[in-house]
Structure formats: structure tokens, C-alpha cells
Amino acid sequence: MAAQPCWLSSSARPWRQSAGGRLTRATGIRNQSTCRLHHMNTRTATCSCGQLTLIVRGDPIRVSVCHCLACQRRTGSVFGAQARFPRSSVTISGRSTEYVRTGDEGSRVIFSFCPQCGATVHYSVEGYDEGSISVPVGAFADPEFPVPSFSVYEERMHSWISLPAGVEHMA
């Protein structure tokens, strides 16, 4: 079956699904009312050793980047990039250990990481959208993952960082 172009609702960019199920950029646009690609996407996120796995069906609710100092420390990078999904579309397998951190605004963030290799595979924020789960984008190891649409804590953003056009900014 030939790859069919589609607009994904979360990123407003044209994508197509290849024969192997991988998303790639498309050159055409298909009417969203006839496109069912965003209901068929399946992605797998894993820890570094592969012991803890998370499978999601469907597109992310939102892809965002966070420049807070806690995310910089947690990731060992200059920001955290995460995708939020409905809990109902997520299947988790493997063992995890939890680490609870209190965020800048007092909310408790529950990180689930692999007890073997230490990589965070998913997390949630207590009292905030209990029906969703966040996954670090890097856990998918997919360079074709949809681009972020939201950026937070930009007052702590490194001066050399530039974000994609159209990203919603929140200081």
C-alpha cells in the first residue's frame, strides 16, 4: 500500500506513513476528514537498556520543551523535550522506580525510570491532567518525531537556543 500524506493534528505539518509504519514528511496534503493516520500511529519509547518499554497509540496531545533548571539537571541537556499522551492510549511493560520532585510552582512530578539503567521513560504531574502521561521525546529515538508546539520557562533558556517557528511561548 502506498504511503498517504496526512495532516497530523498535533503539529500541523504534513506527514506520511511508510510501509514499515514510520512517519516521514509528505509532499502533498490529504483532507483530514478522510485521513485516519493519526488514529493508527504506534510509537515505542524505551529506556537505554530496553527493560522498560512504553507503547503509545495515536498522536501526542502536545509536544513541548521546558527550559527550567530542574529539567536541565534531569536530562543532562539544556532543556527537556516531552510529548503528552492520553493514559488510555499507553501500554507500559517492565519494572520502574519512581522519583518524586516538587516543581517550581509546588506541583509534584512523578518520574518513572528504569532501575537498571536509570533512564526516565515517563512521568506525570499530580493534580494536572490526571488522564495524561508525559514521555521524554528522546525515549522514542525517532528523529522524525513531531516538532514541539509549546515552550515554557524561557527566562532560563540558554541564549544560543533557537526554537521552530510557530512555537507558543510561555515565560
Image: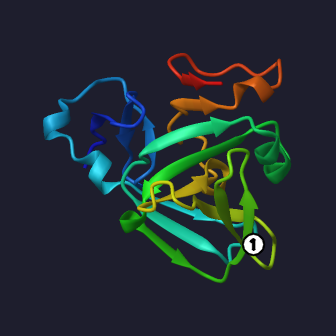
* Amino acid type, callout 1: Cys
Where is 100 relative to 9, above or below? below
Which image quarter is the C terminus in?
Answer: top right
Q: Residue at x 44, y 48 (%)?
A: 60
Left or right, 29 with reference to 70: left
Which residue is located at x 53 percent, y 42 percent? Answer: 145
Q: Is residue 126 above or below residue 27?
A: below
Which residue is nearer to you in this view: 100 or 139? 100
Total marks in image: 1
Residue 88 image-quadrant placement = bottom left
Residue at (27, 43) in percent of width and height: 2
Residue drawn at x 71%, y 19% is 162
Q: Is residue 126 left or right of residue 23?
A: right
Give the side of residue 133 with respect to residue 65, left or right: left
* Relative depth, front residue between 118 and 87: 87
Q: Which residue is mark 1?
A: 49
In this rendering, does residue 149 appear at all? yes
The quarter of the picture where residue 131 lies is bottom left
Q: Residues within 10 Å of mark 1 (few under 14, many from 20)?
A: few
Task: Report the side of 5 relative to 115 (left or right).
Answer: left
User: Can you give x and y, in whole percent of width and height, for residue 49 in the image?
Assistant: 75, 72
Is residue 157 visible to the viewer in this orientation of the structure? no
Pinpoint residue 156: horizontal percent, then vertical percent: 79, 28
Q: Is residue 56 above or below residue 144?
A: below
The picture places residue 26, in percent across and down from the top left corner, at 38, 29
User: Residue 120's image quarter?
Assistant: bottom right
- Where residue 11 appears, x then y in whole percent? 42, 32
Question: Height in image: 27 above or below 123?
Answer: above
Colouring of the image? rainbow
Q: Helix, strand, or loop for circle 1?
A: loop
Q: Residue furthest left?
A: 34
